[in-house]
Image (cartoon, helix red, strand yellow):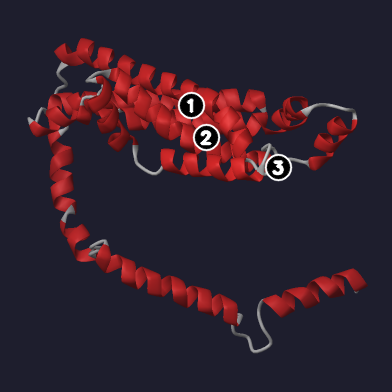
Amino acid sequence: MSCGASMVMAGTVAMWPTRSGWPPAGALAAGAAILALLAVAAPAAEIDPVRVIDSLGAMADFAGHLLVAPDWSYLPDLATKMLETLAMAFLATVIAAVLSLPLGILAARNATPHVAISHLTRQLLSVMRALPELMWALVFVSAVGLGPLPGVMALAFVATGFLGKFFAETIEAVDTGPVEGVAAHGAGWLQVRRYAILPQVAPDFIGIVLYILDHNLRAATVLGLVGAGGIGYDMVMSMRLFQYDRIGLIALAIYVAVTVLDRASDQLRRRVI
């Protein structure tokens, strides 16, 4: 046996299993801590297996009500609302992508002009994503009124917080070699970020933007609850009025939209990578 192989085996034996055959003390302590947290969290979240099992009948009964003839006369209104939802998600994602680029650069510790700017920008991004889209939609509805506009504003606001955070973390993980090489040729602050940092993070950033677009489409479907446009209002009202012939169509339309967007995102991501 070679010396390298002996060292690898020795290291493996030292970590797992131990000489006594038991897991390491650190692994046991971590497992015990996780079990303790689960034991505390389960009652707080009202996790009751018996209650879940008893509810299966009610869920099956609700699903059975959906097996009715669809209300085909609702299709024109459904198409209009779905197009509105798609437009909201797309516009919000584009706005968030544009805004998060400079914020991500300012938040990244290896790209910001000063460490204080990085801390302030990260705090701003934390505030932007602290509350869900529905809460910000309430704020913007009270400010600009009902309609798709407050929905776009809410989606873009929260998405900017997430995109800026992801973008900053991606920048901080870039290879420093190209950055030092471009800087050694006398490039300025903006040129280093344009030619050494952005090309490295572009594939990851595009992938994150496509994920946020997928998320925004789902989030936009519920903003109608507070009058912020989209299919959400029709979905909730159909459930309250027990209009199962419309609920099925709405659920199918959302599923088709999400699936088509997911396939298109995969194709675009492959091309970029």
Relative image position of residue 45 (x, y in whole percent): 26, 61
Decide: is 13 above or below 184.
below
> Circle 2 — which element?
helix
Q: Crowding at label 1, few (<14), some or many (≥20) Cα neighbours within 10 Å?
A: many
Q: Are marks 3 and 1 in contact (CB under 8 Å)?
A: no
Identify the residue at image location x=89%, y=33%.
184
Question: Is residue 101 found left or right of 252 in the rendered image?
Answer: right
Relative image position of residue 159 (x, y in whole percent): 45, 32
Q: Which residue is mark 2?
A: 163
> Circle 3 — which element?
loop
Check disc 1 and give the amino acid type: Ala
Nearer to us in this view, 204 or 18? 204
Q: Which residue is mark 3?
A: 110
Question: Is residue 132 found left or right of 111 in the rendered image?
Answer: left
Q: Is residue 59 visible?
A: yes
Q: Are marks 1 and 2 in contact (CB under 8 Å)?
A: yes
Q: Residue furthest right?
A: 2
What is the count of numbered marks?
Answer: 3
> How far apart, in angstroms, are the residues tagged by discs 3 and 2?
17 Å
Q: Residue furthest left?
A: 241
Identify the residue at image location x=54%, y=30%.
100
Check disc 3 and give the amino acid type: Asn
Q: Which residue is mark 1?
A: 96
Check disc 2 and give the amino acid type: Leu
Question: Looking at the image, is mark 3 or mark 1 earlier in the sequence?
Answer: 1
Question: Looking at the image, is mark 1 or mark 2 earlier in the sequence?
Answer: 1
Q: Quadrant of residue 68?
A: top left
> How far apart, in angstroms, are the residues tagged by discs 1 and 2?
7 Å
Q: Which mark is residue 17?
A: none
Q: Are marks 3 and 2 in contact (CB under 8 Å)?
A: no
